[in-house]
Each structure stands twice: as structure tokens, then as C-alpha cells.
Amino acid sequence: MISTKLLLKRNKNKSKSFLTHLEILQSYNLNALQWVAIGFAVFLLGLSKAGIKGIGIIIVVILAFVFCEKASTGVLLPMLIIADIFAVIYYNRYTHGNIFLSSYHG
């Protein structure tokens, strides 16, 4: 998906051979409708994390239409990781540390 022109330009300009996040996103050349579809997929991801079953397959299909099949998996995995991080940060205030530690030690 990433154009070789962009990689060669990046290698000539800097000694580092990796791309920034913005350069990777620009290499996909997404239009407004595709960005709306990605936003809708993120919204559905939030609903699936809230406990609504069966929505996960819709997210995969939307991302497969926007990106190719293999790239959609690479896009979905960071989305899931970030959603889990936000969930841990949000629900951390509702945890009882002594109950957690007692179940962990014994």
C-alpha cells in the first residue's frame, strides 16, 4: 500500500528508514466517505466494547472495504489496544485494590 516513491523520498531526505504516522495515512489517499466509514467503525468498536455482541464482524467488514484485507487487520489491532487502554483508565477508579491483590496472591 505504501508507495515506493514515498519510501525513496523518505530515504533520500533522512537517514531513518521508517515513516511517520502522518505519511502512512497520506499514502492510503482516503477520501471523505472512507474517513466517515472509519469513524463509524470506531463508534461500533466502542459499542462492542460496551457489551453489544455481534458488532465486531461489521467492523471487520467496514475496514476490509476501506483498506485491503491484510491492512484492515493491522488497522483494527491498534484500535482495539487503544480502546482497552481507555477502558482500564476509566474503570480504574472503580476497582478495589485489596480485593484484586488478595485474589492475585492466593
Image (spheres, grey):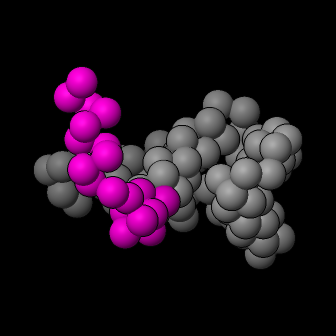
The answer to whether residue 69 is left or right of residue 83 is right
Expressed as whole percent of the image width and height from the top left, the position of residue 105 reads 20, 28
The answer to whether residue 79 is left or right of residue 40 is left
Image vertical order of residue 33 relative to residue 41, above or below: below
Task: Tell me which residue sits at (73%, 66%) in the image.
Answer: 43
On whether residue 95 falls in the magenta region, the answer is: yes
Residue that sits furthest to the top in the current view: 106
Quarter location, residue 23 = bottom left
The answer to whether residue 17 is left or right of residue 64 is left
For the residue pair 66 and 9, the one nearer the viewer reads as 66
For the residue pair 11 and 84, the one nearer the viewer reads as 84
* Position of the N terminus by quadrant: top right
Q: Main secondary structure of the magenta part?
A: helix
Task: Tell me which residue sits at (31%, 33%) in the image.
Answer: 103
Expressed as whole percent of the image width and height from the top left, the position of residue 44 reads 76, 59
Q: Which residues are magenta?
A: 87-106
Expressed as whole percent of the image width and height from the top left, the position of residue 49 reads 65, 53
Task: Tell me which residue sits at (24%, 24%) in the image.
Answer: 106
Regarding residue 24, the answer to whether it shows in the image is no
Image vertical order of residue 29 relative to residue 15, above or below: below
The answer to whether residue 79 is left or right of residue 96 is right
On whether residue 30 falls in the magenta region, the answer is: no
Regarding residue 43, the answer to whether it shows in the image is yes
Task: Tell me which residue sits at (74%, 60%) in the image.
Answer: 47
